[in-house]
Amino acid sequence: MKKIIIALMIVMTSFLSTALATEQSQSKDGSSVLYTTTTSYRATYQGKRYISGVYENTWMTSQMANPETKAFAYVYDKEKARNAALNELTDVTTLAGMKRMIQNGKAILYSSTWKKLKLTEAFFPQNMTSEFYLDKEKNGIVLVFQPGDLAPYSEGVTYVVVEPRVNPKKD
């Protein structure tokens, strides 16, 4: 099933950015709840060997104060016919390594609106992300962290751009 979803994402993101939205009323214990969800797919990179993209899903019910957002990303290796592992694309594969790169200015932390953020000890994940994608515009690997992992929840999904082993501008 996961392979089918990834294949669908590759096909959808290969040709255009796609956004879907829906609203649905749900009845729970006799009360009506409005449920809204928005999904977007964006191709971030297409080269001879790799194709990459990001998928975001945002949802909200009428009982929520703010929407919830979750982001997923992939880098598909056409030669190996599978998703690429992070250690195949960059040397930044641990939280300690990522933290060191951010502190040395060799990696940059961004909010969901691509505003530069400062790394603080108050927000630091327990596990390295498994969500990442290649980005030709940023000439790097973008590590995707969920809201609240690397910055206050209000900053949304956060991104860390790190140096790739693969040059996105030459693939």
Image (cartoon, rainbow, N blue to C red):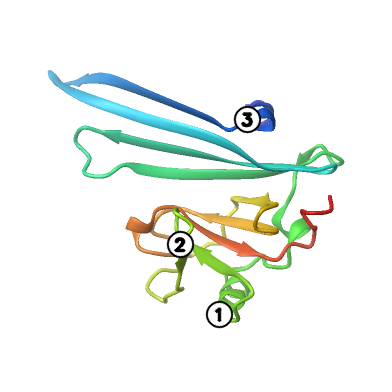
Q: Nearer the viewer, residue 114 or 126?
A: 114
Question: Residue 155 falls in which quadrant of the image?
Answer: bottom left
Instruction: Locate residue 42 relative to residue 119 in the image: left or right.
Output: right
Q: Amino acid at mark 3?
A: Leu
Is disc 1 placed on a helix, strand or loop? helix
Nearer the N terminus, badge 3 or badge 1? 3
Which residue in the structure is indicated by mark 2? 115
Instruction: Locate residue 29 relative to residue 128 in the image: left or right.
Output: left
Nearer the N terminus, badge 2 or badge 3? 3
Tag of residue 16: 3
Q: Amino acid at mark 1?
A: Gln
Which residue in the structure is indicated by mark 1? 103
The answer to whether the residues at label 2 and label 3 have Cβ atoms under 8 Å apart is no
- The span from disc 1 to disc 2 (Cα, nearest Å) is 17 Å
The answer to whether the residues at label 3 and label 1 have Cβ atoms under 8 Å apart is no
- The span from disc 3 to disc 1 (Cα, nearest Å) is 36 Å
Q: Is residue 67 above or below residue 12?
A: below
